[in-house]
Amino acid sequence: MFDADKNLVTLKTLADTLSDSINGYRDAAEHVQASEYRELFTSMASDREAALNSLNALIEEHGAEGETGGTTLGHLHQSWLDFKARVTGRDDKAIINEVERGEDYLKGKFEDAMKLENLDASTRTAIDEAYSSVRQGHDRVSALKHQLEATA
């Protein structure tokens, strides 16, 4: 038996978290110095927007409004990063480390959702498809972080 409320709550939670990710990538692109990282983060924000649009379409099919603003926790985290940057400075390596930390969080949220039972097939498919973008983004940023650590 499928639980419609569980489907909707799961989709909305993941959509909120994807929205936080988009905001994080945009912020990283705005503050990073190297143009190659700026282009990467801008591209990754676009990839996440596509995943968010897909989840939002399904949320709307469930009769609810799609997500666009992110979570309170995401906004608080961004405020903390802005404060920390004013105190300690912001360099590309620090920004990439924070992006990777966010990617770990996002990947974990999707992996938890994928373990849930009683989700309908369309919800499970949407989660799996969005997770593909999340996993690829996580792996790219993780590799970039490790590459920077190796050259330091």
Image (cartoon, helix red, strand yellow):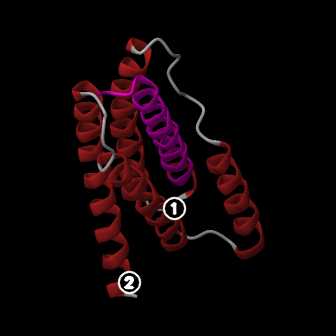
- Relative placement, left or right, of 130 versus 92 is left
Of the 4 image quadrants, the one containing the N terminus is top left
Q: Amino acid at mark 2?
A: Glu
Determine if the magenta segment contains residue 27: yes
Question: Magenta region: which residues?
Answer: 1-28
Q: Is residue 128 left or right of residue 54?
A: left
Task: Give the structural element (helix, strand or loop) at label 1.
Answer: loop
Give the structural element (helix, strand or loop) at label 2.
Answer: helix
Residue annotated with mark 2: 149
* Nearer the observer, 49 or 4: 4
Residue 33 is tagged as: 1
Front residue of 46/127: it is 127
**Against 54, is 110 above or below?**
below
Q: Quadrant of residue 148?
A: bottom left
Say if 26 sits above or below 15 in the image: below
Q: How many marks?
A: 2
Q: CA distance from mark 2 to mark 1?
A: 17 Å
- Which mark, by number, is residue 130? none
Type of amino acid at the residue the image marks with label 1: Gln
Q: Is residue 18 magenta?
A: yes
Q: Earlier in the sequence, mark 2 or mark 1?
A: 1
The residue sitting at 33% across, 68% down in the picture is 142
Residue sitting at 46 percent across and 26 percent down?
5
| Quadrant in which the C terminus is drawn | bottom left
Instruction: Write the residue at 28% across / 70% down.
Output: 143
| Crowding at mark 1 (Cα within 10 Å: few <14, some 14-19, many 20+) | some
Badge 2 density bin: few <14, some 14–19, many ≥20, Cα 10 Å: few
Give the x, y percent position of residue 93. Answer: 48, 73
Residue 111 quadrant: bottom left
Residue for point 46% across, 11% down = 63
Q: Position of residue 20 (x, y in %)?
A: 54, 44
